Amino acid sequence: MAYDPMVHPGPRLPAVGAEQTAVRIYEVAPRDGLQNEAQVVTTDDKVELIERLVRSGLTDIEVTSFVRAAWIPQLADAAEVLARLPRREGVRFWALVPNVRGLERAVESEVRCVATVMSASETHNKKNLNRTRRESLAGLREVIATAKAEDMRVRAYLSTVFGCPYEGEVPVAESVGLCVDLLEAGADELALGDTTGMGNPAQVFAIIEALRGAGVPLDRIGLHMHDTKGTALANVLAGWQAGVRTFDGSVAGVGGCPYAPGASGNAASDDLVHLFTAMGVQTGVDIDALAGAGVFLADRLGRSLPGRYHRFHLGAAPASPAAEGGPSRARHTA
Ligand code: MG
């Protein structure tokens, strides 16, 4: 997408002391994170992870997906996870529902918040969901209408808004049109996905501005950024500057990029909480408790996870010789 800085200069950061508004961190590790991990985490460990995430202060956690078990064996225990989670005032557990059958299972599990998914680009939609966008939208209209009739809250993910791994650039007008369609279908909120980390801050400004121009309220927009090439935090900051207040994150950055094995995927929620807290923006999340949940998960997966704050937290833990006052190497820092 052509970007003209004279047309989209972007708002500046507010001055220190200026009114700053709280953000909502929407945690996706138990669903989006774990479905991209090769190893299957036990139901016991998922429940423990989610309880730790709740204790950290997170209020929105996507805990599983009602997708066919043969497709995503990592999340085959969706109903059991939900049955074992104690419901708490002020905490919303979300489940992804790809279709009407998934929604029926979600209703049976008494989950009150569901998320749907489709792509902004035709090729990604066909490869990811085996349907055209038109077919997806028709199916989602039924899913969303049924969920709203059940008095559920509905989030609609739109993938590849910031670029498609097959088509490249995705016209902003097509994303905006689909966002408007999904809201008209009854979705309460949107989550714009940077599926393979192709987005940049200038583009974030331009897309948010286009959505505003189409009458989409900022408080119905969330950003689901990926750190595949290191731009997630910059894109989140741009989104915040543009007025968005909901950001998706995965603790410790768990969940790789399905299109680039070994590359980072989701923005790390601990990185987001640290970023906003450092700026004086309220998240309601205790960074130490959240980072502790990430350490627990890395231990259960038996692999190191990519989140920056997660790695800092590990290095700052008492186990490190430097933190215990042991011998330390000379540091040539800059
Ligand atoms: Mg993701």
Image: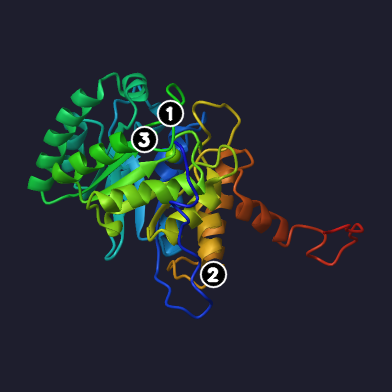
Which residue sits furthest left?
149
Q: Is residue 201 visible?
A: yes
> Marks 3 and 2, Cα distance to the nearest angstrom?
29 Å
**Relative depth, front residue between 39 and 242:** 242
Q: Are marks 1 and 2 in contact (CB under 8 Å)?
A: no
Please tell me which of labels 1 and 2 falls first in the chain. Answer: 1
In the displayed structure image, the side of residue 152 where residue 280 appears, left or right: right
Q: Secondary structure at mark 1?
A: loop
Which residue sits furthest bottom?
17
Binning the other alpha carbons within 10 Å of mark 2 as few (below 14), some (14 to 19) or many (20 upward) gives: few
Ligand 1 within 8 Å of disc 3? The answer is no
Mark 1 or 3: in front is 1
In the displayed structure image, the side of residue 305 where residue 150 appears, left or right: left
Q: Secondary structure at mark 3?
A: strand
Q: Are marks 3 and 2 in contact (CB under 8 Å)?
A: no
Residue under circle 3?
159
Please tell me which of labels 1 and 3 falls first in the chain. Answer: 3
Residue at x-position 15% and y-position 40%? 144
Residue under circle 2?
279
> Marks 1 and 3, Cα distance to the nearest angstrom?
9 Å
Q: Secondary structure at mark 2?
A: loop
Rendered location of residue 272, percent (x, y): 51, 57
> What amino acid is found at the position of numbered circle 1 in the picture?
Cys
Q: Which mark is residue 41?
A: none
Q: Are marks 1 and 3 in contact (CB under 8 Å)?
A: no
**Relative depth, front residue between 239 and 209:** 209
> Marks 1 and 2, Cα distance to the nearest angstrom?
32 Å
